[in-house]
């Protein structure tokens, strides 16, 4: 039997930060180990995209988002690449968007099965956003239960568990970007505290 420590004791340990060669320092890819009381309880991967600096240096928004397929897909969901601004649906979705085009994409988060259902994921998301989301307008995530990477014959379970994951993320304020599978959170809004969600 696993004895859980308070969820707020979760630590995020970068595995190997890597900077994009093509985007200079404008996109940072970070792999994290999620640790509690010395035990690995999960992993996460994120992209912190400082596209505002790239735009000011004369780089096109499209090429700044083209670091990886995940950052491109996210960029396509939130930006009008021709106008180099947020899509109107993003502006309608949020009342308080900070005046920058920087974004944080939480690309992958996996909590070990025995630690799921204990609030670890929300604490990890909140800590990731607070640390790597500084200076960003949006935190973006594409909810997908990773145990279904091979979904053949399990579509009904996948839909059920994806809905549970979406409801879980909505506790932090993530809302669906219309017409996409992405969910976003304006970082101009006040975030909950770790204590309030754990």
Image: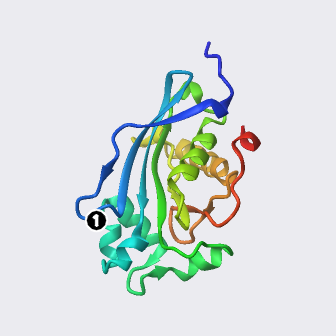
Q: Residue visible at 33% across and 77% down?
A: 57
The total of numbered circles placed on residues is: 1
Q: Residue visible at 59% across and 72% down?
A: 98
Q: Is residue 98 above or below residue 152?
A: below
User: In the orientation shown, which residue stands out farthest toward the top?
Assistant: 1
Q: Quadrant of the N terminus?
A: top right
Q: Residue visible at 55% across and 68% down?
A: 137
Find disc 1 in the rendering and name its residue.
23
Q: Nearer the viewer, residue 24 or 148?
A: 24
User: In the orientation shown, which residue stands out farthest toward the left?
Assistant: 21
For numbered disc 1, what is the local secondary structure? loop
Q: Nearer the viewer, residue 82 or 49?
A: 49
Query: Residue 174, how many percent across, how many down?
Result: 63, 58
Query: Residue 53, how many percent across, how many down?
Result: 39, 72
Q: Residue visible at 43% across and 73% down?
A: 52
Q: Nearer the viewer, residue 62 or 11?
A: 11
């Amino acid at each position: 039997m696993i004895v859980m420590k308070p969820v707020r004791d979760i630590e995020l340990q970068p595995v190997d930060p890597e900077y994009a060669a093509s985007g200079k320092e404008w996109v940072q890819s970070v792999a994290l180990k999620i640790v509690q009381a010395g035990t690995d309880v999960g992993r996460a991967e994120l992209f912190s995209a400082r596209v505002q600096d790239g735009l000011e240096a004369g780089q096109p928004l499209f090429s700044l988002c083209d670091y990886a397929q995940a950052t491109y897909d996210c960029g396509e969901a939130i930006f009008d690449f021709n106008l180099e601004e947020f899509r109107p649906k993003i502006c309608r979705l949020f009342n308080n968007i900070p005046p920058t085009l920087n974004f944080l994409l939480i690309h992958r988060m996996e909590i070990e099965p025995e630690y799921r259902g204990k609030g670890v994921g929300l604490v990890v998301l909140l800590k990731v956003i607070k640390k790597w989301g500084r200076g960003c307008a949006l935190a973006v995530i594409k909810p997908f239960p990773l145990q279904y990477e091979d979904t053949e014959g399990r579509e009904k379970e996948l839909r059920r568990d994806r809905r549970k994951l979406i409801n879980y993320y909505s506790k932090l304020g993530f809302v669906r970007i219309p017409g996409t599978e992405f969910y976003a959170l304006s970082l101009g809004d006040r975030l909950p505290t770790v204590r309030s969600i754990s």
